[in-house]
Amino acid sequence: MVNRIADILIKYGAIEFGDFTLASGAKSSYYIDMKTASTNPELLAIIGREIAENYEFDVVAGVAVGAVPIAVAVSLASGKPYCIIRKEEKDHGKSGKLIGDVIDKKVLLVEDVTTSGGSVLFGVDALRENDADISEVVTVVDREQGAFERLKSAGVRLSALVKASEIVYIES
């Protein structure tokens, strides 16, 4: 196979077949388990290097929980800071949705898997509310179920290291 990221996702068992309900509510005959796969340091390091070497940014950001390990891997590979986007704003301590400085910085938002793009749009909105320059998202796997179009309509370009059709075609 030409796509080495797809190869390593298959190697580490990131795809399973069965009956699944996705975060978007959609039903699927396959599941891409990036959260478990990204607990493997070898896989995470490869993904981090791939993104760090191919995209320009000042800060990398990820929405908790699934994208945070990817953001950390990209940060370590690039030597650039990262930002965590909380799902809910804290009302204690240092409140807010973001952990990290993004003001007036070019931010690359990373995601583990995109389907409809809802989680990513949440992250884009949070970054824009905090004066970040955000125009690009990189996902490890795009399920090719509307995220690209939805993000494009929000003025954001979605790039995928792997498209689901590349993995599902090989495994089915």
Image: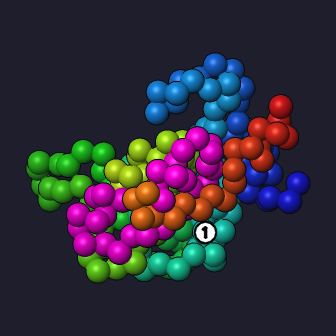
Residue 64 picture location, percent across and down: 39, 49
Q: Which quarter of the image is occupied by the C terminus?
A: top right
User: Which residue in the protein does label 1 denote?
Assistant: 51
Seen in the picture, residue 56 relative to 94 is either above or below; the reply is: below
For the point 31% across and 72% down, the residue is 132
Direction from residue 131 to residue 124 in the image, left or right: right
Give the farthest residue toward the left: 92
Chain part drawn in magenta: 124-152
Instruction: Provide the secondary structure element on which disc 1 rests.
Output: helix
Q: Nearer the viewer, residue 158 or 94?
A: 158
Residue 65 picture location, percent across and down: 42, 46
Hey, which quadrant is residue 159 in on the image? Answer: bottom right
Q: Which quarter of the image is occupied by the N terminus?
A: bottom right
| Residue type at the position of mark 1 | Ile
Q: Nearer the viewer, residue 112 or 92?
A: 112
Is residue 97 visible in the rendered structure shown here?
A: yes
Direction from residue 103 to residue 172 in the image, left or right: right
For the point 47% across and 78% down, the residue is 57
Residue 139 picture location, percent across and down: 57, 56
- The stretch drawn in magenta includes residue 126: yes
Q: Nearer the viewer, residue 18 or 47?
A: 18
Is disc 1 surrounded by few (<14), some (14 to 19) or many (20+) residues within 10 Å? many
For the point 66% across and 68% down, the residue is 50
Residue 61 picture location, percent across and down: 41, 64
- The stretch drawn in magenta includes residue 161: no
Is residue 99 visible in the rendered structure shown here?
A: no
Q: How is the image coloured?
A: rainbow
Seen in the picture, residue 75 relative to 8 is either above or below; the reply is: below
Give the farthest residue toward the top: 19
Seen in the picture, residue 118 relative to 131 is either above or below; the reply is: above
